[in-house]
Amino acid sequence: MHLRAPAILCAARAHGEHAAVLRLMTADHGLIAAYCAGARGRRLRPVVIPGNLLDVELSARSASQLPFARVELVTSRGPWLGEPLASAAIGWATALTAATLPESQPYPVLYDALGAVLEAICHAPSARGWVGALAAYQELLLRELGYGSSGTRDAPSDDWPTLLARLERQGKAIGARLLAERRGDAMGAHAILLDRLKRIAGDL
């Protein structure tokens, strides 16, 4: 195995003293787990942040071996991690993707949609500019994974209570259908995001 492709980093789990196992979303190869030496070192620590767009080179001697990854930063989400709401949204979108998608199955439409959601979170003037996009991504993910009739499809709306209700309803469907046996950190990230969105409801 040898490939090079742009990828969205969805998760990084510490491995040993300095390395990490990365979960990378690519357009043509789907979600891929890979070992990255030095990922927790000074040089790569700002690169290995969930939500970052990376240029990734993967190599493995056999299909059964965890590939080794070399990564270079293309677009950083680091500047937005100091903003509680944006950080929570990036954390949920990436954790959701890492926890639900099967490995090595391409979902190019989800790759493009996730990239668009992350761009909206980072560059929209307010949460109102990206909450609808996040809800659309959750709906798309449910549909791509076989839950198109889950009852989560809604007409687009800019009404803030309606948007929050839509996110909450989709979150319940995701928790029950996609993460029923491995809710853990992913649904915790969803709860944090909803709590922060509800806190700002009176300011919008």
Image (cartoon, grey):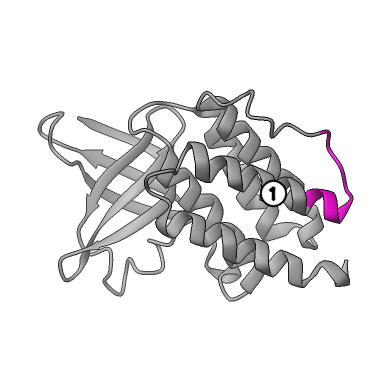
**Pick the front one: 16 or 59:** 16
Q: Which image quarter is the C terminus in?
A: bottom right
x and y percent of residue 81 in the render? 56, 70
Q: Nearer the viewer, residue 133 or 53?
A: 133
Seen at 81% across and 56% down, the residue is 128
Residue 77 is drawn in which quadrant? bottom right
Report the amino acid beneath label 1.
Leu
Q: Say which element carries label 1.
A: helix
Q: Position of residue 195 (x, y in %)?
A: 66, 67
Residue nearest the viewer, comparing 156 with 21: 156
**Residue at x 19% of width, y 30% of height:** 1
Q: Residues within 10 Å of mark 1 (few under 14, many from 20)?
A: many
Residue sitting nearer the eye, 24 or 41: 24
| In the rendered image, the vertical position of residue 135 relative to residue 95, given as above or below | above
For label 1, the residue is: 167
Examine the image and state in which quarter residue 14 appears. Answer: bottom left
Magenta-highlighted residues: 155-163
